[in-house]
Image (cartoon, grey):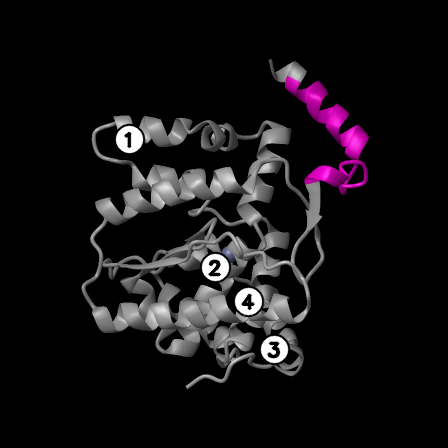
Amino acid sequence: MSRINNINRRKFLEIFGGCSCGLMIASCSTAPITQRKQLKLLPESTLNKQAAQIYENVKNKTKLSDNKKQLDEIKEIGSRIEESVSAYFESKNQNDPTYNFNWEYILIDNDKIKNAWCMPGGKIAVYTGILKVTKNKHGLAAVMGHEIAHAVAKHSVERASRALVLNVSTAAIDIFTGGAISNASRATGVDVAGMLRTFGIDNPFGRKQETEADFLGLIFSSLAGYDIRESVKIWERMKEANKGKEPPEWMSTHPSSVRRIESLKKWIPEIIMDYPPIRKIS
Ligand SMILES: [Zn+2]
Protein backbone atom coordinates (compact mmCIF):
# COMPACT_ATOMS: atom_id res chain seq x y z
CA MET A 1 0.00 0.00 0.00
CA SER A 2 2.71 2.41 0.95
CA ARG A 3 4.52 1.73 -2.32
CA ILE A 4 1.44 2.71 -4.31
CA ASN A 5 1.01 5.77 -2.16
CA ASN A 6 4.59 6.73 -2.77
CA ILE A 7 4.20 6.32 -6.50
CA ASN A 8 1.05 8.41 -6.46
CA ARG A 9 2.75 11.03 -4.44
CA ARG A 10 5.77 11.09 -6.71
CA LYS A 11 3.55 11.30 -9.76
CA PHE A 12 1.68 14.17 -8.19
CA LEU A 13 4.85 16.02 -7.41
CA GLU A 14 6.21 15.37 -10.89
CA ILE A 15 3.12 16.70 -12.54
CA PHE A 16 2.40 19.63 -10.35
CA GLY A 17 5.79 20.52 -9.00
CA GLY A 18 6.36 22.78 -6.05
CA CYS A 19 3.51 25.16 -6.60
CA SER A 20 0.94 22.52 -7.54
CA CYS A 21 -1.01 25.20 -9.33
CA GLY A 22 0.18 25.49 -12.91
CA LEU A 23 -2.10 22.91 -14.45
CA MET A 24 -4.88 22.68 -11.96
CA ILE A 25 -6.54 25.96 -12.70
CA ALA A 26 -9.94 24.68 -11.69
CA SER A 27 -8.85 23.61 -8.24
CA CYS A 28 -6.49 26.45 -7.56
CA SER A 29 -7.22 29.87 -6.28
CA THR A 30 -5.42 32.57 -4.41
CA ALA A 31 -5.69 33.69 -0.83
CA PRO A 32 -7.38 37.05 -0.37
CA ILE A 33 -5.09 40.11 -0.24
CA THR A 34 -1.80 38.18 -0.09
CA GLN A 35 -2.55 36.48 -3.45
CA ARG A 36 -0.73 33.38 -2.30
CA LYS A 37 -1.63 30.41 -4.54
CA GLN A 38 -3.69 27.73 -2.86
CA LEU A 39 -4.64 24.18 -3.80
CA LYS A 40 -8.33 23.56 -3.17
CA LEU A 41 -9.65 20.17 -4.20
CA LEU A 42 -12.55 19.91 -1.82
CA PRO A 43 -15.76 21.88 -1.68
CA GLU A 44 -15.83 24.55 0.97
CA SER A 45 -19.56 24.08 1.50
CA THR A 46 -19.05 20.52 2.76
CA LEU A 47 -16.33 21.60 5.15
CA ASN A 48 -18.49 24.44 6.49
CA LYS A 49 -21.41 22.08 7.02
CA GLN A 50 -19.31 19.62 8.99
CA ALA A 51 -17.73 22.40 11.00
CA ALA A 52 -21.17 23.75 11.92
CA GLN A 53 -22.16 20.29 13.15
CA ILE A 54 -19.07 20.01 15.32
CA TYR A 55 -19.65 23.51 16.62
CA GLU A 56 -23.15 22.46 17.76
CA ASN A 57 -21.57 19.56 19.62
CA VAL A 58 -19.06 21.86 21.27
CA LYS A 59 -21.92 24.09 22.41
CA ASN A 60 -23.76 21.13 23.89
CA LYS A 61 -20.81 19.43 25.50
CA THR A 62 -18.74 22.23 26.98
CA LYS A 63 -19.57 24.61 29.79
CA LEU A 64 -20.35 27.99 28.31
CA SER A 65 -19.66 31.09 30.33
CA ASP A 66 -22.61 33.05 31.68
CA ASN A 67 -20.58 36.26 31.68
CA LYS A 68 -22.85 38.18 29.35
CA LYS A 69 -20.74 41.32 29.38
CA GLN A 70 -17.68 39.41 28.21
CA LEU A 71 -19.58 37.51 25.54
CA ASP A 72 -21.09 40.76 24.32
CA GLU A 73 -17.61 42.20 23.92
CA ILE A 74 -16.55 39.16 21.89
CA LYS A 75 -19.63 39.51 19.67
CA GLU A 76 -19.05 43.24 19.31
CA ILE A 77 -15.44 42.75 18.18
CA GLY A 78 -16.50 39.88 15.93
CA SER A 79 -19.25 41.80 14.20
CA ARG A 80 -16.96 44.79 13.64
CA ILE A 81 -14.39 42.51 12.02
CA GLU A 82 -17.15 40.74 10.00
CA GLU A 83 -18.48 44.04 8.67
CA SER A 84 -15.05 45.43 7.95
CA VAL A 85 -13.93 42.35 6.01
CA SER A 86 -17.06 42.45 3.84
CA ALA A 87 -16.87 46.24 3.39
CA TYR A 88 -13.21 46.01 2.40
CA PHE A 89 -13.74 43.45 -0.38
CA GLU A 90 -16.82 45.33 -1.54
CA SER A 91 -14.78 48.53 -1.77
CA LYS A 92 -12.25 46.69 -3.95
CA ASN A 93 -14.95 45.17 -6.18
CA GLN A 94 -13.78 41.71 -5.16
CA ASN A 95 -15.79 38.71 -4.08
CA ASP A 96 -16.36 38.67 -0.34
CA PRO A 97 -14.69 35.45 0.90
CA THR A 98 -17.11 35.43 3.83
CA TYR A 99 -20.35 35.72 1.81
CA ASN A 100 -21.31 32.14 2.76
CA PHE A 101 -20.22 32.41 6.41
CA ASN A 102 -22.65 31.95 9.22
CA TRP A 103 -20.81 33.78 11.99
CA GLU A 104 -21.29 32.64 15.54
CA TYR A 105 -19.48 33.29 18.83
CA ILE A 106 -19.24 31.37 22.08
CA LEU A 107 -17.30 31.93 25.29
CA ILE A 108 -16.22 28.65 26.88
CA ASP A 109 -15.97 28.72 30.65
CA ASN A 110 -12.47 27.37 31.27
CA ASP A 111 -9.94 29.60 32.99
CA LYS A 112 -7.18 27.05 32.53
CA ILE A 113 -7.28 27.07 28.75
CA LYS A 114 -5.67 30.07 27.10
CA ASN A 115 -7.00 29.55 23.63
CA ALA A 116 -9.36 30.68 20.90
CA TRP A 117 -10.24 29.25 17.50
CA CYS A 118 -12.33 29.85 14.41
CA MET A 119 -13.69 26.94 12.44
CA PRO A 120 -14.45 27.07 8.71
CA GLY A 121 -17.51 29.20 7.98
CA GLY A 122 -16.95 31.60 10.88
CA LYS A 123 -17.67 29.49 13.98
CA ILE A 124 -15.66 31.09 16.74
CA ALA A 125 -14.85 30.07 20.30
CA VAL A 126 -12.94 31.98 22.95
CA TYR A 127 -11.91 30.35 26.25
CA THR A 128 -12.16 32.48 29.40
CA GLY A 129 -8.51 31.60 30.14
CA ILE A 130 -7.15 33.66 27.26
CA LEU A 131 -8.94 36.81 28.45
CA LYS A 132 -6.31 37.22 31.16
CA VAL A 133 -3.72 37.50 28.41
CA THR A 134 -5.69 39.57 25.91
CA LYS A 135 -6.59 41.99 28.75
CA ASN A 136 -8.48 44.57 26.64
CA LYS A 137 -10.59 44.79 23.47
CA HIS A 138 -7.58 45.56 21.30
CA GLY A 139 -5.79 42.47 22.55
CA LEU A 140 -8.87 40.33 22.07
CA ALA A 141 -9.30 41.77 18.57
CA ALA A 142 -5.71 40.76 17.78
CA VAL A 143 -6.35 37.13 18.77
CA MET A 144 -9.77 37.00 17.09
CA GLY A 145 -8.44 38.74 13.97
CA HIS A 146 -5.74 36.09 13.62
CA GLU A 147 -8.20 33.21 14.07
CA ILE A 148 -10.76 34.76 11.72
CA ALA A 149 -7.98 35.24 9.14
CA HIS A 150 -7.43 31.45 9.04
CA ALA A 151 -11.11 31.02 8.16
CA VAL A 152 -11.25 33.92 5.68
CA ALA A 153 -8.16 32.57 3.87
CA LYS A 154 -9.78 29.09 3.82
CA HIS A 155 -6.75 27.46 5.37
CA SER A 156 -8.71 24.36 6.42
CA VAL A 157 -9.82 23.69 2.85
CA GLU A 158 -6.26 24.04 1.67
CA ARG A 159 -4.97 21.83 4.44
CA ALA A 160 -7.54 19.11 3.88
CA SER A 161 -6.83 19.19 0.12
CA ARG A 162 -3.14 18.76 0.72
CA ALA A 163 -3.72 15.93 3.17
CA LEU A 164 -5.96 14.19 0.68
CA VAL A 165 -3.42 14.42 -2.12
CA LEU A 166 -0.41 13.42 -0.07
CA ASN A 167 -2.17 10.65 1.84
CA VAL A 168 -0.66 11.90 5.06
CA SER A 169 -3.92 11.88 6.90
CA THR A 170 -7.26 10.18 6.86
CA ALA A 171 -8.73 13.15 8.65
CA ALA A 172 -9.60 14.93 5.42
CA ILE A 173 -11.44 11.93 4.05
CA ASP A 174 -13.19 11.55 7.38
CA ILE A 175 -14.42 15.11 7.22
CA PHE A 176 -15.81 14.69 3.74
CA THR A 177 -17.50 11.41 4.34
CA GLY A 178 -18.72 12.45 7.74
CA GLY A 179 -16.82 9.49 9.23
CA ALA A 180 -15.20 11.35 12.10
CA ILE A 181 -18.43 13.04 12.99
CA SER A 182 -20.59 9.92 13.01
CA ASN A 183 -17.98 7.85 14.85
CA ALA A 184 -17.73 10.50 17.51
CA SER A 185 -21.48 10.77 17.79
CA ARG A 186 -21.87 7.03 18.16
CA ALA A 187 -19.41 6.87 21.03
CA THR A 188 -20.68 7.57 24.50
CA GLY A 189 -20.09 11.22 25.01
CA VAL A 190 -18.96 13.28 22.11
CA ASP A 191 -15.22 13.50 21.69
CA VAL A 192 -15.07 17.22 21.17
CA ALA A 193 -11.29 17.32 21.42
CA GLY A 194 -11.02 14.62 18.78
CA MET A 195 -13.29 16.49 16.44
CA LEU A 196 -11.40 19.72 16.86
CA ARG A 197 -8.25 17.79 16.08
CA THR A 198 -9.85 16.66 12.84
CA PHE A 199 -9.96 20.29 11.79
CA GLY A 200 -6.44 20.87 12.98
CA ILE A 201 -7.71 23.31 15.59
CA ASP A 202 -5.24 22.02 18.17
CA ASN A 203 -2.36 21.99 15.75
CA PRO A 204 -0.35 24.77 14.21
CA PHE A 205 -1.22 25.43 10.61
CA GLY A 206 1.77 25.50 8.27
CA ARG A 207 4.33 28.23 8.59
CA LYS A 208 3.06 30.04 5.48
CA GLN A 209 -0.50 29.91 6.76
CA GLU A 210 0.49 31.20 10.20
CA THR A 211 2.40 34.09 8.69
CA GLU A 212 -0.54 34.82 6.42
CA ALA A 213 -2.96 34.73 9.37
CA ASP A 214 -0.71 37.10 11.33
CA PHE A 215 -0.62 39.50 8.40
CA LEU A 216 -4.32 39.31 7.49
CA GLY A 217 -5.31 39.37 11.16
CA LEU A 218 -3.56 42.71 11.58
CA ILE A 219 -5.30 44.04 8.47
CA PHE A 220 -8.75 42.94 9.61
CA SER A 221 -8.28 44.34 13.15
CA SER A 222 -7.02 47.61 11.69
CA LEU A 223 -9.94 47.87 9.26
CA ALA A 224 -12.27 47.22 12.21
CA GLY A 225 -10.71 50.16 14.06
CA TYR A 226 -8.65 48.40 16.73
CA ASP A 227 -5.17 49.33 17.88
CA ILE A 228 -3.06 46.64 16.24
CA ARG A 229 0.06 47.59 18.18
CA GLU A 230 -1.47 45.51 20.97
CA SER A 231 -0.66 42.33 18.99
CA VAL A 232 3.03 42.58 19.90
CA LYS A 233 2.12 42.99 23.58
CA ILE A 234 -0.05 39.85 23.39
CA TRP A 235 2.93 37.80 22.30
CA GLU A 236 5.00 39.27 25.09
CA ARG A 237 2.27 38.51 27.66
CA MET A 238 1.98 34.99 26.23
CA LYS A 239 5.68 34.53 26.83
CA GLU A 240 5.25 35.84 30.37
CA ALA A 241 2.34 33.45 31.03
CA ASN A 242 4.58 30.71 29.74
CA LYS A 243 7.33 31.18 32.30
CA GLY A 244 8.16 27.93 34.04
CA LYS A 245 4.87 26.33 32.99
CA GLU A 246 3.30 24.47 30.14
CA PRO A 247 2.98 26.81 27.18
CA PRO A 248 -0.50 28.33 26.86
CA GLU A 249 -2.58 26.57 24.19
CA TRP A 250 -2.74 29.58 21.94
CA MET A 251 1.00 29.74 22.05
CA SER A 252 1.59 26.07 21.40
CA THR A 253 -0.84 26.07 18.47
CA HIS A 254 0.68 29.32 17.22
CA PRO A 255 4.39 28.87 17.77
CA SER A 256 6.03 32.10 18.72
CA SER A 257 9.43 33.23 17.66
CA VAL A 258 11.52 36.33 17.76
CA ARG A 259 11.14 36.53 14.02
CA ARG A 260 7.38 36.49 14.31
CA ILE A 261 7.31 39.44 16.68
CA GLU A 262 9.78 41.19 14.39
CA SER A 263 7.46 40.64 11.42
CA LEU A 264 4.52 42.10 13.34
CA LYS A 265 6.58 45.13 14.29
CA LYS A 266 7.60 45.61 10.67
CA TRP A 267 4.05 45.26 9.30
CA ILE A 268 2.20 47.35 11.88
CA PRO A 269 3.16 50.87 10.66
CA GLU A 270 2.51 49.90 7.02
CA ILE A 271 -0.85 48.33 7.80
CA ILE A 272 -1.99 51.29 9.90
CA MET A 273 -1.29 53.49 6.85
CA ASP A 274 -2.64 51.16 4.16
CA TYR A 275 -5.68 49.72 5.95
CA PRO A 276 -7.21 52.48 8.06
CA PRO A 277 -10.50 51.83 9.88
CA ILE A 278 -13.37 51.30 7.48
CA ARG A 279 -15.81 52.22 10.23
CA LYS A 280 -14.98 54.40 13.19
CA ILE A 281 -14.91 52.56 16.49
CA SER A 282 -17.12 54.02 19.17
ZN1 LIG B 1 -2.90 30.55 13.64
Amino acid type assigned to the residue bearing label 2 in the image: Glu
The residue indicated by pointer 2 is 147
- Mark number, residue 268: 3
253 sits left or right of 155 in the view: left
Q: For mark 3, does the 10 Å Cα neighbourhood hold few (<14), some (14 to 19), or many (20 or more) residues?
A: many
In 3D space, how far apart are the residues under numbered discs 2 and 1 (Cα atoms)?
26 Å
57 sits left or right of 88 in the view: left
Point out residue 172 in the picture as x, y percentages from the top left corner.
51, 33
Point out residue 198 in the picture as x, y percentages from the top left corner.
43, 38
Q: Which residues are magenta?
A: 5-27
The residue indicated by pointer 1 is 185
Query: Which numbered disc, 2 or 4, marks the residue that appears first in the sequence?
Result: 4
Amino acid type assigned to the residue bearing label 1 in the image: Ser
Q: For mark 4, does the 10 Å Cα neighbourhood hold few (<14), some (14 to 19), or many (20 or more) residues?
A: many
Q: Quadrant of the C terminus?
A: bottom left
Q: Between residues 221 and 263, which one lies in front from this camera angle?
A: 221
Query: Which numbered disc, 3 or 4, marks the residue that appears first in the sequence?
Result: 4
In 3D space, how far apart are the residues under numbered discs 1 and 4 (Cα atoms)?
35 Å
Query: Which numbered disc, 2 or 1, marks the residue that appears first in the sequence?
Result: 2
- Local secondary structure at mark 4: helix
In 3D space, how far apart are the residues under numbered discs 3 and 2 (Cα atoms)?
18 Å
Above/below status of 87 relative to 203? below
Badge nearest the viewer, 3 or 2 = 2
Q: Are marks 3 and 4 in contact (CB under 8 Å)?
A: no
The residue indicated by pointer 4 is 85
Badge nearest the viewer, 2 or 4 = 4
In 3D space, how far apart are the residues under numbered discs 1 and 3 (Cα atoms)?
44 Å
Q: Are marks 2 and 1 in contact (CB under 8 Å)?
A: no
Above/below status of 118 relative to 85? above
Query: Which numbered disc, 3 or 2, marks the residue that appears first in the sequence?
Result: 2
